[in-house]
Image (tube, grey):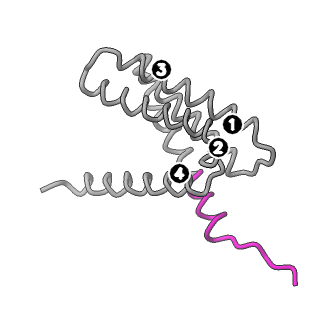
Amino acid sequence: MPSPTSWLNYLLISLMLLGVLLLFWHSTLRRNLTYSSFILLALLGINAGVMFYVLHLTGARLILLGGGLLLIITYALWFRRKPDKVRLDYLKLCWIVALGLFSIVLGSGLREALPYSKGLLAISFWLMLLDFLYSTYIRRPTSTH
């Protein structure tokens, strides 16, 4: 029988995936085929790099480094292009940069930096998700009647 800790991990991973799907669905990035294609390519590269890394296959570090760099560069270009920015946009940028940095740190072999980059990734993700839920579903604009 699985331990309660593993059930909690599965629940947290499920919540994270649901949050990412909600963010992407409400995002303006999904309407731009060029940027969303490069972001998807970078995320697929990071996932493939992690699988290669876990399986100890050659090329894992290069795939992780390339995916992380592509993710940071593509999203930074998208962010610079966006005309109106709110707090959630800055939190999304922090999360994407933290994800790219985690991939780069994992690919570069800097083991002593992994806990810090993992912590930064978790903090930026939960801040972004909570702000998204608050601004989308809790805080309602007041009507001016």
* Label 1 to label 3: alpha-carbon separation: 20 Å
Q: Residue furthest left?
A: 1
* Label 4 to label 1: alpha-carbon separation: 22 Å
Q: Which mark is residue 126?
A: 4
Q: Position of residue 34 (x, y in %)?
A: 62, 36
- In front: label 1 or label 3: 1
Q: Position of residue 89 (x, y in %)?
A: 69, 47
The quarter of the displayed image where residue 106 is located: top left
Please say if the residues under marks 4 and 1 sit with CB atoms less than 8 Å apart: no
Task: Give, as a single range, the part of the protein colored magenta.
Answer: 128-145
Q: Which mark is residue 51?
A: none
Q: Amino acid at mark 2?
A: Asn
For label 1, the SS is helix
Q: Residue at image x 55%, y 51%? A: 24
The quarter of the displayed image where residue 33 is located: top right
Query: Callout 1: few (<14), some (14-19), or many (20+) C-alpha neighbours within 10 Å?
Result: some
Quadrant of the frame with the N terminus: bottom left
Residue under pointer 1: 78
For label 4, the SS is helix
Residue under pointer 3: 65
Residue under pointer 2: 32
Query: Callout 2: few (<14), some (14-19), or many (20+) C-alpha neighbours within 10 Å?
Result: few
Q: Residue at image x 36%, y 30%? A: 48
Q: Is residue 8 rendered to the left or right of residue 71?
A: left
For label 3, the SS is helix
- Is 42 drawn above or below residue 82 in the view shown? above
Q: Amino acid at mark 3?
A: Leu
